[in-house]
Amino acid sequence: MDLNEARNKIDVIDDEMTRLFTERMAIAREIAAYKSEHKLPVFDRERERAVINRVEDKVGPELESYANVLYSTLMDVSRSYQHRSIRTNSGIGEDIRRAIEETPAVFPGRATVACQGVEGSYTQAACDRLFNTPNIMYFNNFKSVFQAVESGFCRYGVLPIENSTAGSVNEVYDLMKKHKFYIVRSTKLQITHSLLAKRGTKLSDIREIYSKDIALEQCSDYLSSLKGVKTRVCENTATAARMVSESDRNDIAAVSSRNCAQLYDLVSVEDGIQNNANNYTRFICISKNLEIYPGADKTSLMFSVDHKPGSLYHVVSRFSALGLNLTKLESRPMPNTDFQFMFYFDLDANIHDEKVQRLLCEFDDEYEKFTYLGSYSEAT
């Protein structure tokens, strides 16, 4: 058999497979109507597993793994088509449509906003970028920010979520599993650290340096070059600057923003001490209620999948099938479980796109621990 003859045979087989695929999808649509009439869920895990097992048995050991991939994908496609044909309105689907209709056209310029730290923090700078004239309420830790928003004490909260040098803010990701909230906007802020001390203090006088753990990590190269100097972790970079200002010691300093020098009557011993000049932190703005403003082209999700081979692949492949760009995938262990993980996804996905909404409804139907974290745009 030559190559052209083989390809012609493949074409004939493909034509028959296309006819059978069309016929199969028509039957899937009938099944969807039955499920809708009898209030049955679209996703039937037991049935899908039985179909795949039966096919693997038929093709034999050599092809069973390939058959598994083919039919798992076919099940995803069939399930999506069933959702579309009966237009399943899951709770999250209705919430999204309602939020799109009811959210004002313009993001508010003024609001009561919860931030961790004190005046002069990088979070405060991010808050000022997100809002024109925010009424900022400061809290000692990230947990209190979540609680202030969840209780309705503050309409919004601003939190750091990841840094281009130090990576994700793990404490924030862990708290995201415990609180009910939505992301309504985000922004990126360039972080430039300075070494601040009291007036008259020289670099050679300094014996201890205070700052947030992430800030110390971002300046590790510079700090390691200072012999005989200890580092101390505190709640916030601005808090560190304030501690130095209020202390009666002249041998301590803070890694903080240059803005805090004027704010707390300190001087900069040295500027730009971070490891990387291209140092950015991404901040999210969270709300108790789902708000989707015009231009929301980013979507964040959180859910766990079965602890077995291929589970995560099946999720990611569905993003790819819709042409959605996955910009971040973060995993965090779930407490009190045997190697179970919660996955966080950031996507370039416009929530106004019907196929994106439909995909989220499918996830909501299929995964017990699925959370839609919101759709938003990034302020520049």
Image: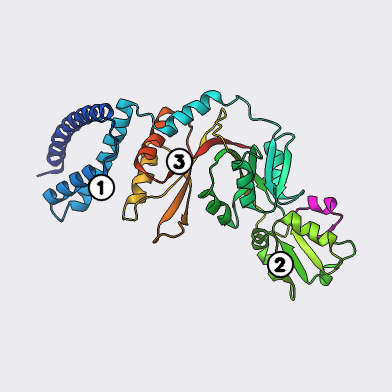
Work out whether residue 27 or residue 322 is closer to the camera in this orientation and state it. 27
Q: Circle 3: is it few (<14), some (14-19), or many (20+) Cα within 10 Å? A: some
Residue kind at label 1, given as amino acid type: Val
Q: Residue at x 56, y 56 (%)?
A: 170
Magenta residues, start to end: 256-271
Horizontal and vertical percent position of residue 81: 29, 31
The residue depicted at 70 percent of the width and 31 percent of the height is 109
In this rendering, position of residue 3 left or right of residue 298: left
Name the one closer to the observer, 100 or 219: 100
- For label 1, the SS is helix
The numbered dot on residue 232 is: 2
Residue 64 % position (x, y): 18, 52
Q: Nearer the viewer, residue 259 or 1?
A: 259
In the rendered image, residue 287 lying in the magenta stretch gets the answer no
Q: What's the colour scheme?
A: rainbow
Q: Callout 2: few (<14), some (14-19), or many (20+) C-alpha neighbours within 10 Å?
A: few
Q: Amino acid at mark 2?
A: Arg
Mark 3–mark 1 Cα distance, whole angstroms, equals 22 Å
Gap between marks 2 and 3, in whole Å? 40 Å
